[in-house]
Each structure stands twice: as structure tokens, then as C-alpha cells.
Image (cartoon, rainbow, N blue to C red):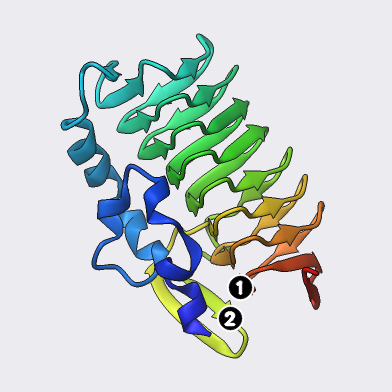
Amino acid sequence: MTEQLMIKSLLDMDQTIAAEVFEGCTYPWEVLSKIKDEILRIGNSLSEDEYMKVGEDVWIAKSAKVSSTASITGPAIIGKEAEIRHCAFIRGNAIVGEGAVVGNSTELKNVILFNKVQVPHYNYVGDSILGYKAHMGAGAITSNVKSDKTLVTVKAGKEKLETGLKKFGAILGDNVEVGCNSVLNPGTVVGRNSNIYPLSMVRGYVKEGSIYKKAGEIIAKN
């Protein structure tokens, strides 16, 4: 079961500018504490022909579309052809992949969004990694701190992995679809090509290629 939680089982490294930070790591949440330094490393190496540095440690691709009402605090990288919409709030340690969409009133903090990710309507994504073409429906959020403030664990079947992290939201594999107004509890990992029903409260590991209807009712896609 733990192999399904590994980086190689969840994420396509060809679909992020930050592939190097995953090297030497086994599980994707190991990267969360390294995002800030990785942004600074990448940012200082970006081509001035393709990216412009705005303010302190914020690099924005010249082909990206950024609303004048968006708020971006560094360190941050906004990739090529990305779209940052009205009143988006990016508050540090965020990598927004190529062609990604960060929408109206969406908040990001300490995240890596792979290429073509969409978080387009009233989403909160904190201390999380979203794989290639992952999509979160309107109002869907990651909850990144346990109510009792203890360290986050990842539960997969009878196995439980200690992360050592107080703040850890969710890992979404490539092509995951999360329905509107769903809550991904701390330590949620959703395997590639899975769907989460709207209004779901998700915890633990959802197997690749699944449809999550509710707790205890998860079926394989046809």
C-alpha cells in the first residue's frame, strides 16, 4: 500500500518546473518544507526573456495573465500561460504551473500546483501539492491543520505513516477531480484519475482510479 503513496505513483515530474525538489524524496509531503528554498533557486535561474521579477521574490511569466486585483506575496513563481483571476490571494511559497488557473477569491499558501491545475472558484489550498490537470470544484478546500494540533499522519488501509508535519493539507495525483464544497482533511492523498463527489469529507488515501462517494463507499471507475 505504501508504494501507492510514493511520488512516482502519484505525480508526473515532466509537468512541473519544480521536479528537482522531489529528487531524493520518497513521499510527496517530504517536499512541503522545501518549497520556499526551491522557489528562490528556480527564480534566480529563470530567463529574463520569459519571466519578469515583480517585487520581492515574485517571478511571473510574461505570457501569464494576472488580474490587477490579485495579491501575490513572494516567494512565488507564476508559470507560462497561467491565469491568476480577480482577487486571488497567493500568500507565499507558491509555485503555479504552466497553464494553471487560480480563480476568484482562491487562496494559496505553501503549495506546488503542477501544470494545468485548476483551482478556479473560492478554493483554499494550503501546504499541499496538486498534480497535473488536477481540478478542485467551487468551494472545495484543503484543511491543513488537525483540530487537536497534533502531527499529521497519512492513513492507507491498516497502515499509518507519520509525516512529522503539523501543517499538511492534501496531495492530489494527476487528473484528480474534486467536487464542489468538498473538504480534504489533513493528510489526504488522492490517487491518479480519481473523482471525489461534491460535498465530500475526505480523509486518508483514496486509491487510484476510484470514485469517492462518501466514507466507506469508494468504487473503482469502469
In the rendered image, residue 105, in percent from the top left (x then y), is placed at 62, 26
Q: Is residue 25 left or right of residue 47?
A: right
**Observer-nearest residue: 67 or 48?**
48
Q: Quadrant of residue 174?
A: bottom right
Residue at position x 61%, y 27% in the image: 103
Q: Earlier in the sequence, mark 1 or mark 2?
A: 2
Residue that sits furthest to the top in the current view: 68
Q: How many C-alpha atoms fall within 10 Å of the one at disc 1: few (<14), some, or many (≥20)?
A: many
Residue at position x 34%, y 64% in the image: 30
Contact flag, marks 1 and 2 (Cβ < 8 Å): yes
Secondary structure state at the residue bearing disc 1? strand
- The amino acid on which the numbered mark 2 sits, given as a three-letter code, is Ala
Secondary structure state at the residue bearing disc 2? strand
**Observer-nearest residue: 220 or 118?**
220
Quadrant in the picture for the C terminus:
bottom right
**Observer-nearest residue: 199 or 3?**
3
User: Residue under circle 2?
Assistant: 156
- The amino acid on which the numbered mark 1 sits, given as a three-letter code, is Tyr
Between the residue at mark 1 and the residue at mark 2, the CA separation in whole angstroms equals: 5 Å
In the displayed structure, 222 sits above or below 108; it is below
Q: Quadrant of residue 211?
A: bottom right
In the displayed structure, 57 sits above or below 96; it is above
Residue at position x 30%, y 24% in the image: 59
Q: How many C-alpha atoms fall within 10 Å of the one at disc 2: few (<14), some, or many (≥20)?
A: some
User: Residue under circle 1?
Assistant: 205
Q: Quadrant of residue 110?
A: top left
Residue at position x 70%, y 64% in the image: 202
